[in-house]
Amino acid sequence: MEETKSDHDAVQQHLLVDMDELGETKQKLRISELTLILDTGVPILSDVSVDIPNGLIVGIIGPSGSGKSTVLRAMNRLWEPPKGTVFLDNQDIRDLDVLSLRRKVGMLFQVPVLFEGTVADNIRYGPQLRGKKLSDSEVTKLLNLADLDSSFATKNGNELSVGQAQRVALARTLANDPEVLLLDEPTSALDPISTQAIEDTILKLKKTCKLTTVVVSHSVRQIQRMVDIVYLLVDGKIVEVLRPDRLSEANHPMARRFLELS
Ligand SMILES: Nc1ncnc2c1ncn2[C@@H]1O[C@H](COP(=O)(O)OP(=O)(O)OP(=O)(O)O)[C@@H](O)[C@H]1O
């Protein structure tokens, strides 16, 4: 059945989240009625609206294939959303230079891919594109932020575990001084220790830098540990918006099933 504007409003009104209660009302990023229908006529996203308040961590969860990554990729134009659907600080991201958008809205993927060269080369890469050379102490600071010590700077990517490589990828993203961080199942390939290091870093960045973060995760536990607001996506539609401590109050049958099985 097609979702209408009033269905969307109903979802929003049903919110168990009071944005004022969360203390931040300014929207850093906003997705408004985003729809993707493939040429074959298959709908992938239907009228998806997501508010991402400044300085908070927003989670997007839902069954496999529900469209979570597509929503995330729209936020830094890895998938080009239609005009008038995604806004950063109230500016349509389609009107922004794509490279500067991706610097402001950094992304971390499920599996880290490091460039050839040392860890320090990787971390220096982004700033270098803008003509800035990070000093050794700046590289160390970024490594420390991602819970790695300075000895990693001279290592090569192929000497690292996946967990360490993911932390380097995080440090590399942070080197661009992003305003928003997009995390696409950032710890699903990692052991519990590396998972905790990534989660702790994100929580620290929220506290110290008020970094706005959007995380797609299959782990309900991770969502409960990290996020302020949870959007539940089912079959390309936002069906619930909840606080992480109130996930059990989800009404949508598919959302309930997903949460029970997770
Ligand atoms: N440009 C595209 N062309 C064809 N199919 C697409 C395109 N973009 C997304 N899809 C399809 O849309 C659906 C949603 O994909 P997406 O990766 O966003 O879901 P997901 O919720 O992140 O899934 P998972 O949890 O398994 O990673 C999938 O069936 C995918 O194959």
Image (cartoon, rainbow, N blue to C red):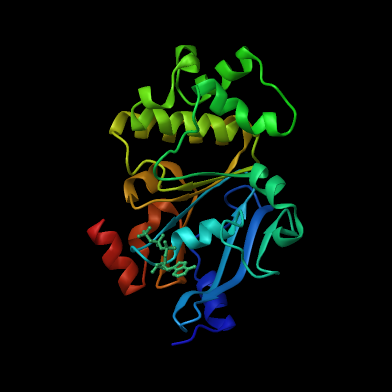
**Which of the 4 quarters of the picture holds residue 49?**
bottom right
Front residue of 134 and 257: 134
Q: Which residue is drawn at 69% across and 34% down?
A: 129
Task: Indicate the position of residue 137 as horizontal and vertical percent values.
Answer: 61, 13
Question: Hey, which quadrant is residue 135 in on the image?
Answer: top right
Decide: is 241 above or below 193: below
Q: Can residue 231 be seen in this view?
A: no
Q: Quick check: 202 left or right of 178?
A: left
Q: Could you tell me which residue is drawn at 55 percent across and 31 percent down?
A: 172
State which image quarter holds ligand 1. bottom left
- List x then y, in percent, for residue 74: 57, 60
Q: Quadrant of the C terminus?
A: bottom left
Q: In the picture shown, does residue 131 fall above or below 55? A: above
Residue 197 position, x and y percent, is: 40, 29
- Residue found at x 37% / y 41%: 187
90 on left or right of 219 = right
Query: In this orientation, does residue 169 appear?
Result: yes
* Front-lying residue, 211 or 181: 181
Q: Among all residues in the image, which is located at the extreme bottom?
A: 1
